[in-house]
Amino acid sequence: MATKSAASSKSHQPQELPRNPGVAFDPEMFKNLNINRSAVERRANTLTKRRSVKKDWQAAWLLKAVTCIDLTTLAGDDTPGNVLRLCAKAQNPIRQDLIERLGVAELNIKVGAVCVYHNLIRTACQALVGSGIPVAAVSTGFPAGQITQGQKLNQIRTSVKAGAQEIDIVISRSKVLTGDWKGLYHEVKAFREACGPAHMNTILATGELSTLTNVAKASMVCMMAGADFIKTSTGKETVNANLPVGLVMVRAIRDYFQQTGNMVGFKPAGGIKTAKQSLEWLILIKEELGDAWLTPHWFRFGASSLLGDIERQLEHHVTGRYSASYRHPLA
């Protein structure tokens, strides 16, 4: 069955997969980068129109998308109660009746991670014991990053000590805007060292970097400094994840891999709310990076409401009818 075969590709990769160790700071790797915005926008605009998936194959790709979601709650009114509900949904993201109708019960589909603020790490870790789902925590003065370097490093260490297996750090946008690439490299390298065994997701906040050339250079510098993932946005900027920015970042990942042999993950975040958008991002990854990156170890969505629309589309696939959003918990 198409749904089963395409969705079954290892929803949770083993943690022993190699990490990006980083490389020495080398301006030659990025100094000649100069991004043609119109060409990037044209490629991004045509990319998803040249590919489409329908019926069983679409359901399979949507199940794949579920396994790549970082189910996120980063609201001022977060409580232990709603984090517990989020963790329950993370372990059973699709209604059981739909799983059975799709014939994929044995795949044990789960989301890629749960992302919370620091004070709720322990709550999430306790709720996810034995699930294999990692807890990610935002750090380093998220979302603006306007605190001292010492405070940022202390936040990282405290979150790792609390049990976070992944740390979402934010870079100092001022270093990009002023061209302080060496300063950015040393900042991110220090973050990586503070993370220790925890994987580091480096948020560029691309909507605040002014140009696509800056996005490309910042991506390269952060990977040189040891980023395990590069992430588009905090979700709090005016402009968050979009395909042109994503195209620039995944091509930087490809270039870095070709130059160093080190794989780096990619995470679009902010404003990704529909099943159709999730398919567009998966197509981008398949076209530009290939199947090796189509696992939750190398690709994630940072999202809070995406799962609800995917579940609605899967119900339509099974029943031929669209359901109301309130039928899907935490949608």
Image (tube, helix red, strand yellow):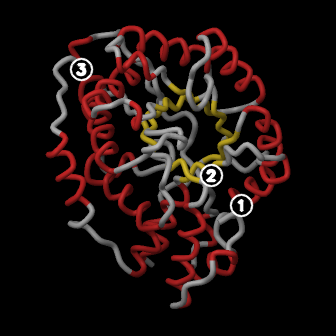
Of residue 322 and residue 211, the one placed in the foreground of this image is 211
**Relative to 238, residue 168 above or below:** above
| Type of amino acid at the residue the image marks with label 2 | Leu
Element carrying mark 3: loop
Q: Mark 3 points at which residue?
A: 30
Q: What residue type is labelled 1?
A: Lys
Give the numbered dot on residue 58.
none
- Residue at the spot 48% in from the left edge and 56% down from the top edge: 272
Any part of residue 21 in sight: no
Q: In this view, does 52 lie above or below 195?
A: below
* Lower position in the chain sequence, tag 1 or tag 2: 2
Q: In this view, does 107 lie to the left or right of 219?
A: right
Q: Is mark 2 on a helix, strand or loop?
A: strand
Give residue 99's position: percent from left, percent from top: 62, 75
Q: How crowded is mark 2: few (under 14 residues within 10 Å), some or many (20 or more)?
A: many
Asked whether the beta carbons under mark 3 and mark 1 sit within 8 Å of each other, the answer is: no
First-in-chain label (3 vs 1): 3
The image shows residue 114, relative to residue 279, as above or below, that is above
In what quadrant of the picture does the N terminus appear?
Answer: bottom left
Q: Which residue is drawn at 24% across and 20% down?
A: 30
Q: Which mark is residue 89?
A: 1
Q: In 3D space, how far apart are the residues under numbered discs 3 and 1 (Cα atoms)?
A: 41 Å
Residue 202 screen position, x and y as percent: 49, 29
> Label 3: few (<14), some or many (≥20) within 10 Å?
some
Distance from disc 1 to disc 2, alpha carbons, whole Å, reads 9 Å
- Residue to which mark 2 is pinned: 71
Q: Which residue lies furthest to the front in this view?
A: 238
Which of disc 2 and disc 3 is earlier in sequence? 3
**Mark 1 vs 2: CB contact within 8 A:** yes
Amino acid type, label 3 = Phe
Seen at 32% across and 50% down, the residue is 243
